[in-house]
Image: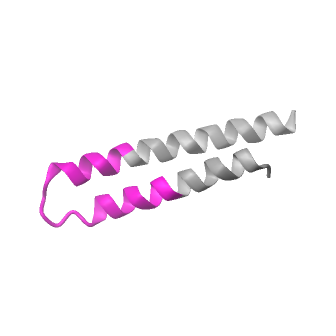
């Protein structure tokens, strides 16, 4: 695994962990933690997609 792939993996893990935290720690019922969690989850999915593209490019 090269350096660029490792960066995408760490970003995906970080954003995914923050998304889970934001979604499950919303005790007040506010919409902002929900919106933040969804945005971070989408960012994590984007980082996973980039990780997959980097891995595919490295194999070729």
The residue under the point 56% across, 43% down is: 47
Residue 51 falls in which quadrant of the image? top right
Of the 4 image quadrants, the one containing the C terminus is top right
Main SS class of the magenta portion in the image: helix
Relative to 25, is 14 above or below?
A: above
| Residue 41 drawn at (x, y percent) | 42, 48
| Residue 55 drawn at (x, y percent) | 76, 42
| Residue 48 drawn at (x, y percent) | 59, 45
Along the line of sight, which residue is nearer the eye, 3 or 35? 3
The residue under the point 30% across, 48% down is: 36
The residue under the point 60% across, 39% down is: 49
The residue stretch that appears in magenta:
14-39
In the rendered structure, the answer to whether residue 2 lies left or right of residue 41 reads right
Q: How is the image coloured?
A: one colour
In the rendered structure, the answer to whether residue 30 lies left or right of residue 53 reads left
Q: Was residue 6 drawn as part of the magenta stretch in this picture?
A: no
The residue under the point 55% across, 51% down is: 11
């Amino acid at each position: 695994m090269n350096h660029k792939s490792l960066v995408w993996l760490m970003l995906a893990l970080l954003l995914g962990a923050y998304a889970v935290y934001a979604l499950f720690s919303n005790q007040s019922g506010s919409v902002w933690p929900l919106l933040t969690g969804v945005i971070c989850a989408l960012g994590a999915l984007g980082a996973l997609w980039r990780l997959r593209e980097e891995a595919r490019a490295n194999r070729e």
